[in-house]
Structures are given as C-alpha cells and as structure tokens.
Image: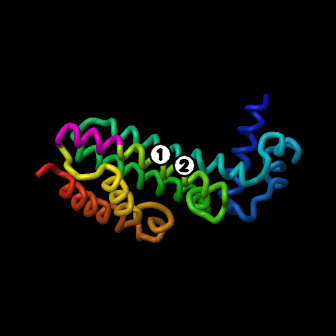
Amino acid sequence: MEIERKELILKAAERLLARHGWQKTTVAGIAKEAHVAVGSVYLEFNSKTLIIHELSRAKYAYILRKMRRAALSQGGYPERFTQMLNARTEGFLEILDTSSHGHDLLHSHCEGVHQAREFFIQAQRELLADFLGAAQDDEVFAFDSLAQTTQAILLAYSHFTPPTLFGIPREHVKPSLMAMHNLVISGLKQK
C-alpha cells in the first residue's frame, strides 16, 4: 500500500510540475492531485524538495541508462563513444519535450534538482572514465591522464547539457554534436 501511495504522489507531483513548474507546485496541490491527505504526502516525503529530488533523480537515471546501453552497444570504441554522448543529449531533449516545464527537473534553483544533478555528474564521470580506460587498455584511444581526459571531455560537451542545450536551436544540435564528436575522437585516437 505504501509503495502505491508513494507512486501516486510522485505521479501527481510530476503532472503538476509539468503544468506549473516547481515553484508553483505545492504539497497541498500534490496531495489533492494524488487524492490523498496532505499528511499522507508528508508520511512519504519530508518536503516538496525531496519529492522533486526523487523525480529529478529518476530523470537523470533514465539518461544514465541510455548512456550505459550505448556504451555497451555494438561497434568500436569511437562509434560507442558517439552513441553514448548522443544518447545523453537525446535524453535531455526528450525530457525537455515532455512539457513546458520539463527542464525544471533537470536544471533549476531547487535544491532537490541540484542534488540529483550532482549524483548524475559523478555517475556519468565514472561511466565515461570506465569507458575511456577500457579504450586505452585496448590501445584504441591514447591519453596521458584518465582523470584529466575525462574531465576535459565532460567540459567540452557541457554545451550539450542543461541549461545551455535548451538554448541551442534544435536544428543546430545534431550537426554541432557531430562536429564535437569528430574533434574529440580524432584527439583520442591512437597515433
């Protein structure tokens, strides 16, 4: 029963956030939308921030799953590297397209979103470092420092993450992303 109630609350919160954004969504509104008492919301979550954190973390987890699948897909390291970062960008854009406030769960001044974003940043750093380390071990990519290379790549691709990504005209995203892939992969390939 508690899992069902928690899911009802999260789904109601997500609907309200999609319509009104995180600042205008209230715990009382979430309770009403979920058809539960306000006290029931507080039994599951201590605050609105925790509800938003849970929803934001789920969005970021979705993007990480897409990235992991791409990293493990068929093809060589350059192809999988491209697929992994394409999957990340596509995931962000899919979430943005869900509503006029889709970006609120990926980038906002809400502490819950900030915490979820920090989790994502660390998890994607680890995923990319593991991928690059394997590519270097297989002598496909060459670089001096795994940590510095991972950080440099994440900085290079930061324009393809919120909030900057959301300001790029949609028709420019894919060509710009492909140009970035070409630059980075040519720099990583074994000489």
| Magenta segment includes 58 | no
| Magenta stretch, residue numbers | 130-139
- In the drawing, does residue 25 fall left or right of residue 57? right
Kindly identify which residue carries mark 2.
119
Where residue 87 appears, as percent x and y from the top left, is 39, 49
Where residue 148 appears, as percent x and y from the top left, is 33, 56
How packed is label 2: few (under 14 Cα within 10 Å), some, or many (20 or more)? some
Q: Which quadrant of the figure contains the N terminus?
A: top right
Residue type highlighted by circle 2:
Phe
Kindly identify which residue carries mark 1.
123
Residue type highlighted by circle 1:
Ala
Where residue 128 appears, as percent x and y from the top left, is 36, 46
**Colouring scheme applied when the structure was drawn:** rainbow
Helix, strand or loop status at disc 1: helix
The prevailing secondary structure element of the residues shown in magenta is: helix
Camera-side residue of 95 and 138: 138
Residue 49 vs 158, above or below: the answer is above
At 75% from the left and 43% from the top, the residue drawn is 9
The alpha-carbon separation of the residues under discs 2 and 1 comes to 6 Å
At 82% from the left and 44% from the top, the residue drawn is 41
Q: Are marks 2 and 1 in contact (CB under 8 Å)?
A: yes
- In the drawing, does residue 58 fall left or right of residue 91? right
- In the drawing, does residue 191 fall left or right of residue 178? left
Camera-side residue of 21 and 85: 85
Residue 105 vs 73, above or below: the answer is below
Residue sitting farthest toward the top: 1
Residue 166 vs 90, above or below: the answer is below
